[in-house]
């Protein structure tokens, strides 16, 4: 929305704020001024001058030497090549030496053109920054001003400050200068009276109903259709002040009658349209105007020359033969104003906004008219808008207004009324506001106080503010007009989580461990979709949002996996194949009244990590991550978080396997023999549902189960004084024997002498029987007080061999 500071200042005579101050006040009150532009800046320095004489240039046939009077008999000569220099006595615009013309980016200097010095420049509209027309110099009307007058004083509309206001859709009153003037007066506590249209200069005989009849067939889409008429008009160019006022606001001057409709649009924010009454085609009822739904497939050529095929949902204005305008969007070419127009029918209506919005989108016609109707115009100013337009046309086009006006309308809806309570006002704003001050603000905004006592008032909302319907809306109006800076900033009382609480301690340790293991932390939403939970086979949601932002955020998560997998899917769509990430957060599972929580959900804290892509390789070919990467991550994580080396991974039983894990790689993670999580590769179905591709392994740890485990202190040992003695043990066992069980047995039997037990090889095939495998362990023996002899090591190692042979049916591999 473009707005004129000069126009607003004219409508609010007592306004003393500068353009910058008013822009700042508008922005603070919610009418954001996104830009401030100077219109016709050069006009503040250019002069109105009178042509004294002109003669041809001595050497250039295309140039003339024009002598002008710049006031008080001061003459100077300028070189001019314009073809429209007026005769002696004509008024033109001079840019004296030293004047800067921002529109052209030049500063006027003394120049010698083909041997003749020029003392300035006679300017066109484009050079002055007024319009884009530059075919000739600007010739002013005779008698406009005395020679030597500044152009901005002779024609104030040539110099203005234009605001670019980013209006929110709920403020349609700001789409007209009267609404902005009301706002400016309210913000500056100025008394303001809405301007009344002047009476027409001339009146015709008869009445408007003898010239046209209006029938509204769809009162729901058009609750009010108003029309008036002006006859004996003369179509011609608009006066300069009107042309420049429109140009400053981005509209091109067309003709005096059309320009009047555009001016009234910008003034009231209420669109209107002018028909050539003589081009309204007769039907059964001559000069009949019908507001109806379009016939399916009906054709309409709009003012922009485009042909449109209408549908039954379009609302049109029709004459006796067919549609002549797409209601609220654009008029038709069949009845447009032309140079031969003598009788004008003016339309001002109130159209239902949703229908206008659909028609505008359907036909790709976003116009100044549709922009306003879509947001909601004032249904109470139809008569005023018609009167203002009729008066201006009689003034500018020499016509005569036909007495009366046509108003085809349904009964108006009752006015919106709401109650404002003083204690509620103070409670919401957090500051005591004098009730009389609040009511004065609402009155300046156009509200009417119907009943009042010291603490309560019944407020009638004006029709130009469709966004005010409740008490809280009135409170918001009081707050923004008084100024948000008048509301003290008080930090709310909060009860933050204690950093030494178990949940916080374990969460911090988990995040630190994840980073130490080379993972990147992802912060995911607690809100997810039902579909995402179903994709990973998570428990069904128990906390459902009543008013979610979107279907993707309709429930509280019961697993951290959907957020991480969606992030992985996004990364892979953008070409990132290798991902190492984790997240820490609560999930929300079903609670029960018997649990002491009153049915509130349980909120265990989980650590979930995913590895995707290929593991790092330096001297070998990269390989995809697999279950062993997941196992290493799980054990390394638990050792860092708990300080215990008793974490283990055991295959998951079929009846306890998480649905999202692959059956051949799913495992349970335990600490001190108690399950605390799961790990393994993702199930192929899950990979497909999230369109992941490639291998992905997952680790999930229930941190709430670890919260009671205090981290074990790190114990440092001195460097061993005595040398180690290593033995390798290669045994053949059945596939059903876990290597971890064999390792635990070796540690148990070897006792304190075995400082290290490491599985360094697994082999199948060759001489190894079917369904069996070879496991090779390296056992390091060392004593703290002496050097072990070979005999002592052999005795202990023999016990280890006997134990694993007896327990697991193992045989030594030769």
Image (cartoon, helix red, strand yellow):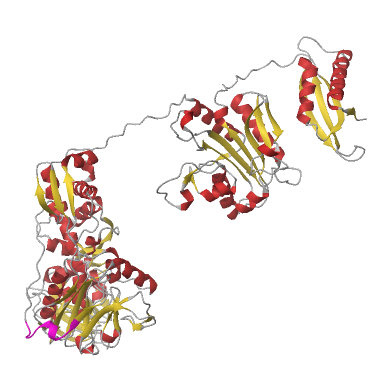
Specify whether 752 is left or right of 669: right
Q: Percent from the top left, x then y, of residue 694?
A: 67, 50
Vertical relation: 166 (above or below) 381: above
Q: Is residue 98 visible?
A: no
**Does residue 205 belong to the magenta stretch?**
yes
Instruction: Locate the N terminus and report the quarter of the image it occupies.
Output: bottom left
Q: How many marks?
A: 0
Which quadrant would the C terminus be assigned to in this image? top right
Asked if one can make out residue 178 in the rendered structure from this viewpoint, the answer is yes
Q: Nearer the viewer, residue 12 or 556?
A: 556
Q: Main secondary structure of the magenta part?
A: loop
Magenta region: which residues?
Answer: 203-213
Residue lying at 23% horizontally and 43% vertically, measured from the top left: 485
Among the 4 quarters of the image, the one containing residue 347: bottom left
| Residue 376 pos. (x, y %) | 26, 64
**Whole-percent x and y of residue 329?**
30, 74
* Residue drawn 64% across the image and 17% down it: 715
């Amino acid at each position: 929305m473009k707005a004129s500071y000069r126009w607003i200042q004219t409508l609010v005579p007592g306004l003393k704020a500068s353009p910058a101050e008013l822009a700042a006040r508008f922005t603070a009150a919610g009418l954001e001024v996104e830009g401030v532009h100077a219109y016709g800046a050069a006009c503040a320095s250019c002069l109105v001058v009178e042509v004294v004489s002109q003669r041809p240039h001595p050497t250039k046939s295309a140039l003339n030497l024009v002598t002008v009077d710049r006031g008080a008999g001061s003459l100077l000569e300028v070189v001019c090549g314009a073809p429209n220099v007026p005769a002696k006595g004509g008024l033109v615009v001079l840019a004296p030496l030293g004047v800067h013309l921002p529109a052209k980016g030049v500063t006027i200097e003394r120049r010698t053109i083909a041997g003749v010095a020029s003392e300035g420049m006679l300017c066109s509209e484009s050079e002055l920054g007024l319009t884009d027309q530059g075919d000739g110099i600007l010739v002013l009307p005779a008698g406009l001003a005395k020679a030597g007058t500044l152009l901005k004083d002779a024609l104030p509309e040539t110099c203005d400050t234009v605001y670019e206001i980013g209006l929110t859709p709920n403020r349609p009153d700001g789409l007209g200068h009267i609404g902005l003037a009301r706002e400016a007066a309210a913000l500056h506590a100025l008394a303001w009276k809405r301007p009344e249209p002047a009476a027409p200069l001339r009146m015709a005989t008869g009445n408007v109903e003898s010239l046209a009849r209006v029938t509204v067939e769809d009162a729901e889409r058009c609750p009010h259709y108003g029309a008036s008429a002006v006859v004996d008009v003369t179509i011609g160019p608009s006066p300069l002040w009107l042309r420049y006022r429109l140009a400053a606001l981005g509209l091109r001057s067309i003709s005096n009658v059309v320009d009047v409709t555009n001016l009234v649009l910008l003034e009231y924010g209420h669109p209107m349209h002018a028909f050539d009454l003589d081009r309204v085609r007769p039907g059964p009822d001559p000069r009949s105007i019908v507001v109806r739904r379009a016939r399916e497939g009906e054709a309409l050529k709009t003012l922009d020359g485009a042909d449109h095929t209408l549908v039954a949902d379009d609302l049109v204005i029709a004459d006796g033969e067919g549609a002549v305008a797409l209601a609220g969007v654009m008029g038709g070419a069949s009845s447009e104003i032309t140079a031969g127009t003598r009788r004008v029918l003016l339309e001002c209506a109130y159209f239902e906004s949703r229908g206008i919005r659909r028609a505008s989108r359907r036909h790709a016609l976003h116009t100044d008219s549709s922009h306003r109707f879509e947001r909601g115009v004032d249904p109470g100013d139809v008569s005023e808008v018609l009167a203002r337009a009729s008066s201006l046309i009689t003034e500018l086009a020499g016509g005569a207004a036909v007495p009366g006006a046509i108003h085809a309308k349904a009964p108006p809806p009752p006015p919106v009324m709401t109650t404002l309570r003083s204690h509620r006002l103070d409670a919401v704003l957090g500051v005591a506001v004098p009730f009389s001050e609040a009511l004065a603000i609402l009155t300046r905004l156009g509200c009417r106080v119907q009943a009042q006592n010291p603490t309560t008032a019944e407020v009638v909302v004006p029709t130009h503010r469709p966004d005010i319907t409740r008490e809280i809306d009135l409170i918001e109006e009081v707050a923004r007009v008084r100024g948000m800076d008048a509301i003290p900033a008080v930090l709310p009382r909060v009860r933050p989580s204690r950093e030494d609480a178990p949940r916080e301690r374990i969460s911090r340790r988990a995040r630190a461990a994840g980073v130490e293991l080379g993972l990147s932390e992802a912060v995911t939403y607690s809100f997810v979709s039902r579909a995402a939970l179903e994709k990973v086979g998570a428990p069904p949601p128990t906390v459902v949002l009543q008013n979610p932002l979107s279907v993707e955020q309709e429930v509280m998560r019961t697993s951290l996996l959907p957020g991480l997998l969606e992030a992985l899917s996004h990364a892979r769509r953008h070409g990132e194949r290798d991902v190492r990430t984790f997240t820490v957060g609560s999930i929300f599972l079903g609670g029960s009244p018997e649990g002491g929580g009153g049915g509130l959900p349980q909120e265990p804290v989980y650590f979930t990590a995913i590895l995707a892509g290929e593991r790092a390789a330096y001297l070998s070919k990269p390989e995809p991550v697999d279950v062993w990467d997941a196992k290493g991550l799980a054990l390394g994580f638990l050792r860092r978080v708990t300080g215990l080396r008793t974490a283990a991974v055991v295959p998951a039983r079929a009846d306890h396997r998480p649905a999202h894990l692959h059956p051949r790689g799913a495992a349970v993670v335990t600490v001190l023999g108690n399950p605390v999580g799961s790990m393994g590769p993702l199930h192929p179905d899950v990979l497909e549902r999230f369109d992941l591709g490639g291998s992905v392994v997952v680790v999930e740890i229930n941190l709430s189960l670890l919260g009671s485990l205090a981290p074990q202190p790190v114990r440092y040992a001195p460097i061993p004084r005595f040398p180690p003695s290593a033995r390798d043990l290669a045994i053949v066992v059945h596939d059903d024997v876990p290597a971890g069980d064999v390792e635990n047995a070796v540690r148990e039997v070897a006792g304190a002498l075995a400082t290290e037990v490491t599985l360094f090889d697994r082999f199948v095939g060759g001489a190894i029987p079917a369904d069996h495998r070879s496991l090779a362990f390296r056992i390091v023996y060392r004593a703290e007080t002496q050097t072990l002899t070979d005999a002592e090591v052999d005795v202990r190692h023999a016990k280890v061999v006997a134990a694993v042979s007896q327990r697991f049916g193992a045989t030594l591999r030769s």
